[in-house]
Amino acid sequence: MGRVLAVIIWIITLLSVLMFLSGKWWFPAAISEHAPALDRQFLITIVVVGISFTAAQIGLGWMVWKYRDTGSKSDRATYSHGSNRLEVLWTVITAVVFITLGVMGQSVWASLRLHDAPAGSYTVEVVAQQFSWNFHYAGKDNKFGRTDPQLIDDSALNFVGLDSSDTASADDSVTTALAIPVNRPVELRLRSKDVIHNFWVPQLRFKQDLVPGMEIKVHFTANKVGKYELACAELCGMNHFKMKSYMLVLPEADIQALQAMPQEQFQARVAELLNQYQLPSY
Amino acid sequence: MSAETHEVHRHPAPTGFIRKYIFSIDHKVIGIQYIMLALAAVLVGMIMSLLMRLNLSWPGKGWPILETLFPTGAPGGVMTAEFYLSLVTMHGTIMVFFVLTTAPQGGFGNYFLPIQIGAEDMAFPYLNMLSFWVTLVGFIVILLAIVVEGNATVGHWFAAFGQSFTGGSGTVGPIGGWTGYAPLSALGKIAGPGQGAGMNLWVISIAIFCVGSLLGALNFITTLLNMRTKGMSLMRMPLTCWAWFTTAVLALLSFPVLLGGGILLLLDRIAGTSFFIPSGLYVSGLLSGSNPNFPLHTGGSPILWQHLFWFFGHPEVYIAILPGMGATSHILATFARKPVFGYRAMVFAIFAIGLLGFFVWGHHMFISGMSPYSAIAFSVLTLSIGVPSAVKTFNWLGTLWGARIRFTTAMLFAIGFVSLFVAGGITGLILGQSSLDLPMHDTYIVPAHFHLVMGVASIFGMFAALYFWFPKMFGRFMNETLGRIHFWITFIGVYAIFVPMHVMGIVGMPRRYSSFTEYRFLDSLHPLVVLVTVAAIVTITVQILFYFNVFWSIFKGKKAGDNPWEATTLEWTTATPPPHDNFAGVLPTVYHGPYEFAVPGAPNDYVMQTDVGADVSSSDGHNGHKH
């Protein structure tokens, strides 16, 4: 029984590790500036995880393989209540490894979250609702028109509650897909009209809740032109699974051109670009 | 403890059937009642997980029985998205509260804590009875949610309680997940199907459950501190007792917070308050305050709910698993025929896990919008909780080192616990880092991680406990052959279910999606989704053997003696099954620590705690002593 159990534990361990090593299922290729550092931290962590997992399972298998009951009355187990030296040793080692890992894990976080977006960032206001996305752009004056929840009227297509009496709103555009420039910091100002949603683009290695009643500012820099799937990653109601949109990462010139367009033209151009770009092959 | 103290608690054995088996104040009967409740609840939760897997693997396929049961929720037998989400919610709620919190603590803790410390009963037997019946009412209320939302006729009866109580939406309950994040959970019917009567019943059920757990926790703490028998010093207690005690402390400190949060949520829903609902919401085409169905709300904080929920929710993870750790330590030592390695370190580790467990709730909220500075503190504290967890693992391996292992079914499950605890716990190193949470949050790696560690490992602890203590509880063994088949298939099955979910998470598959067909980046995962489902079907099917084994063995199992496993602790010194007052009027006196196996020079390879003479160690603790 002990040997069977040991072998099963070892086979499970081997298959589990192989599943991670197969390379068949991994992150989609990253497209953000912070991603390489994050992927490196993930790799370091999963190597530590893999080694600890494998070592513990091999050890466990070895114990059950080796220390079976022989059935003999006179053959007893080793009488030991433990060893303080071993306790201190493994406590210190795990504490050093785990806490070092935890401290290292803060650097990407700190670079993204402890500072405001750099000057010159491209800013988009994101307003999520059950079960769609609205992206609000400032237009050529670089000023967002005033918005007010009291003015929201989905039936009149004023999804973000834009105040048309505010002069700054005249050149603003609202689309259902996100268009951002490549190689330039982007600041998103995230809001929600109803419940909590989450902005999630796997290639960005980035996720953030949109919380009603709060405006949450986040920033990142995308460095590869293309079209990417954008998903909601916080349960928001029945159609959560299809609260989908796209993120277009565009050359600066395209963004400049978009910014100069009035809303209808802006929307038509984004639709055109969405058709033009293909999703990355997975 | 003097004999006089116990006089106060003595109550005569009941004679009538109802006082003996139904409204019993005997901790042993109450323990079995809790276990039966968990066995019923886990069946419901397991069937729900099976339905979810079917929907994910074969989207759009009709299952006729579903249409018969839920004509609105599964037209043509195909689940609606909201039906799927209500399964997600109810599976999580039922499993976490009515399985993982009842069986380990209320079940085995109730039955064996008093016996293991040499007491005649719990300190407050009537309170004990009350805590079970309150918990049962909570379970009935959550089952009611299934009927009220699933059946249109019943749903409309509930309209009598007010508009927000109407049900019949064709779900089996609310659709917001077991975490019930506000404002989705606070807005009422306007937020979607299942969020009316089903959600109200969900909150009420949990509030009732909190009360039941609080009463239980008070009883456990009082009993353990005041009713230990002569010679049963704290450091001579079995590790199970330390685990149950720590669990009770965690429950005492965390359930009131959830209870408070639940009451505030209910007030938001039915009394028009705004604890969790901010101003200016626009939901389903209506502005807050513009319509009687959507009253004016202002000034609430959605994140406040998350803080209250997770301040309870994280300690809850340890409430679920600590008793399993205790049982595993206990059973490993018994069948390794060896003392627990580092008893004192094990006690400190249990306490460290319990204490640190109160300072890490924020790791569920890295991307919630809370301060990024607090995320750093929560992250580092979270990683440090891995240290006492690793210490426990090392000590379990140390216990097996140099052992003479007897591979009973109970031992197999205890070894399985160690394996699964490592597999599930170790990925906490990934999820605990705020940076890595950016891609990982709310993907399948999260359910993979917590199912392995707090779900499956805890359940393995309980399987081990049941196979181990069954002879003491019912006077008969469970069938070992069936038990082994149950172990092998379940052990391999749970790995096949949950390891693939980790790689799904790395690819980025979001949890709580009723369908993955919308996203191209998830297409490559479909074979894994099907693999997981097949493994789940096999694993769930083999549990039928387990249920059969339990109920068959109660009546037909092989008869057991008083100490069939040659174990050392007090439950094995008394009759099988134990008499009403546990020790037939003579409380035992304890002379030894709990795990004196393989003592050199002793006549047997085990020295029971009550054995006079053959003094094998100092009176208080053994760690580091060389013999």
Image (tube, coloured by chain):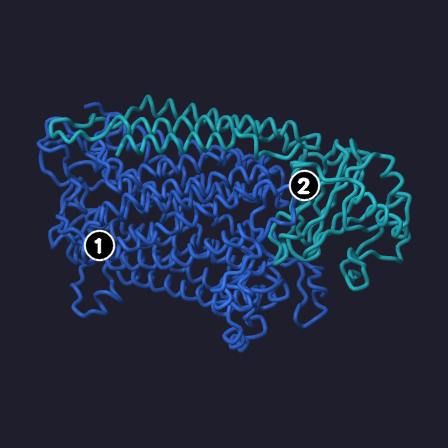
Q: Secondary structure at mark 1?
A: helix
Viewer-proximal residue, B69 or A259? Answer: B69
The residue depicted at 50 percent of the width and 61 percent of the height is B63
- Assess whether mark 2 and mark 1 are in contact (beta carbons under 8 angstroms): no
* Image spot of residue B568 (x, y percent): 17, 39
- Comparing labels 1 and 2, the label whose residue is closer to the camera: 1
Kindly indicate whether the residues beneath marks 1 and 2 are on one polypeptide chain: no
Residue B169, placed above or below residue A195: below
Q: Secondary structure at mark 2?
A: strand
The shade of chain A is: cyan
The amino acid marked with disc number 1 is Ser
Q: Is residue B131 left or right of residue B408?
A: right
The residue depicted at 56 percent of the width and 47 percent of the height is B511
Please say whether residue B399 is visible from this viewpoint: no
* Chain holding disc 1: B
The residue depicted at 83 percent of the width and 34 percent of the height is A251
Q: Residues within 10 Å of mark 2 (few under 14, many from 20)?
A: many
Kindly report the distance in space between the C-alpha atoms of the residues bearing marks 1 and 2: 53 Å
Viewer-proximal residue, A192 or A74? Answer: A74
* Chain holding disc 2: A
* Image spot of residue A215 (x, y percent): 71, 48
- Chain with colour blue in the figure: B
Viewer-proximal residue, B304 or A98? Answer: A98
The amino acid marked with disc number 2 is Val
Q: Quadrant of residue B323?
A: top left
* Image spot of residue B269 (x, y percent): 58, 65
Please say whether residue A227 is visible from this viewpoint: yes
Determine which residue is flagged by label 1: B553
* Image spot of residue B613 (x, y percent): 9, 34
Determine which residue is flagged by label 2: A201
Q: Quadrant of residue B490?
A: top left
Viewer-proximal residue, B243 or B460? Answer: B460
